[in-house]
Image: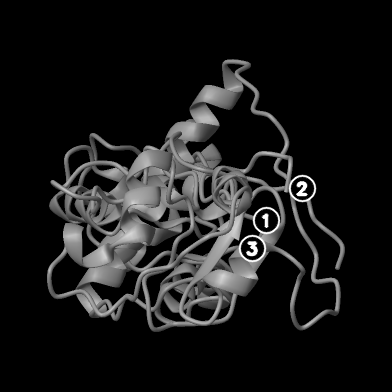
């Protein structure tokens, strides 16, 4: 599949060339103006204000519920950012300039991506993405948070701040890979990893993508971050850390813990 150069969604970036020339945008013939301090109609909603033909004027139009990202301090964007933190979206994604680059960089969406497509993607997760069962408002708030991050990232890029390329893994056609995660963890867990891509096929246990990074939820003993030591202690006796867990002890032969940590931490030496 060819990869197109990611661009900021046109619907969020457009400035109002019509307004700049002193011409009244066609939007105002049908819609009352609001949030004038934010900018023109297209600043938030996109579309083409040079035409009074609805099909042209409304091309790639951003519905109002997805346009709160352009209003500083808006409640939907704030709630969406809280959800990004609560559900640890950054364990796999870059959002608002922070996160792991294991899955799509949500600050650099492909050209032609619409707010509605983001909304649908959240409700229909891709391979290896957890199903969070967000309700309609939560998905709408998340879209606003993503679009706010896109806008902020584009502003940084215009100031000349570049990012390192993302490592992408393609499916190799094998049903199982010969690694310790697949053998020891894959029946119950899944994970996206920098070292070997997607591993595991189970959905019984939590998704372990980004487990040893700062962006994974603090669910180790004592509500702390996961580390190599915490993982080793958990595998040897899960119920010592969480009394009612259903996970059984996993006795790893010498060297396998190091290999497992290397996979989860994205290091070589598998």
| Residue 265 relative to residue 203: left or right | right
| Residue 42 relative to residue 173: left or right | left
Please say if 239 is above or below 267. Answer: below
Q: Which mark is residue 198?
A: none
Helix or strand or loop: what does disc 3 sit on? helix
Mark in the foreground, 3 or 2: 3
Q: Which residue is mark 1?
A: 111
Q: Residue at x 29, y 81 (%)?
A: 133
Helix or strand or loop: what does disc 2 sit on? loop
Looking at the image, is mark 1 or mark 3 earlier in the sequence? 1
**Closer-to-camera residue (269/34):** 269
| Residue 122 relative to residue 256: left or right | left
Q: Which residue is mark 3?
A: 180
Looking at the image, is mark 3 or mark 2 earlier in the sequence? 2
Q: Which residue is mark 2?
A: 5
**Closer-to-camera residue (227/170):** 227
Q: Residue at x 85, y 71 (%)?
A: 172
* Residue 21 appears in view: no
Name the spot of residue 23 as percent of width and height, x first: 47, 42
Q: Are marks 1 and 3 in contact (CB under 8 Å)?
A: no
Name the spot of residue 83 as percent of width and height, x first: 23, 57
The Cα–Cα distance between marks 1 and 3, rounded to whole angstroms, is 38 Å
Q: Are marks 2 and 1 in contact (CB under 8 Å)?
A: yes
């Amino acid at each position: 599949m060819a990869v197109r150069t990611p661009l900021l969604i046109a619907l969020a970036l457009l400035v109002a060339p019509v307004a700049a020339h002193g011409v009244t945008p066609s939007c105002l013939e049908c819609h009352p103006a609001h949030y004038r301090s934010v900018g023109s109609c297209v600043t938030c909603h996109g579309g083409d204000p040079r035409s009074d033909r609805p099909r042209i004027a409304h091309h790639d139009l951003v519905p109002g519920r997805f346009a709160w990202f352009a209003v500083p301090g808006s409640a939907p964007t704030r709630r969406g950012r809280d959800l990004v933190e609560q559900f640890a979206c950054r364990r796999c994604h870059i959002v608002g300039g922070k996160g792991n680059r294991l899955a799509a960089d949500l600050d650099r969406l492909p050209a032609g991506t619409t707010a509605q497509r983001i909304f649908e993607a959240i409700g229909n997760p891709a391979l290896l993405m957890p199903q969070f069962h967000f309700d309609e408002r939560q998905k709408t708030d998340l879209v606003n948070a993503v679009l706010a991050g896109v806008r902020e990232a584009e502003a940084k890029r215009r100031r000349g701040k570049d990012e390192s390329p993302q490592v992408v893994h393609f499916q190799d056609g094998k049903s199982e890979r010969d690694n310790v995660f697949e053998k020891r963890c894959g029946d119950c867990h899944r994970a996206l990893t920098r070292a070997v891509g997607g591993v595991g096929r189970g959905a019984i246990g939590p998704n372990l993508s980004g487990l040893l990074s700062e962006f994974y939820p603090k669910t180790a003993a004592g509500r702390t971050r996961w580390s190599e030591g915490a993982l080793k202690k958990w595998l040897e006796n899960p119920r010592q850390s969480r009394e009612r867990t259903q996970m059984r002890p996993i006795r790893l032969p010498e060297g396998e813990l190091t290999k497992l940590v290397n996979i989860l931490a994205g290091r070589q030496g598998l």
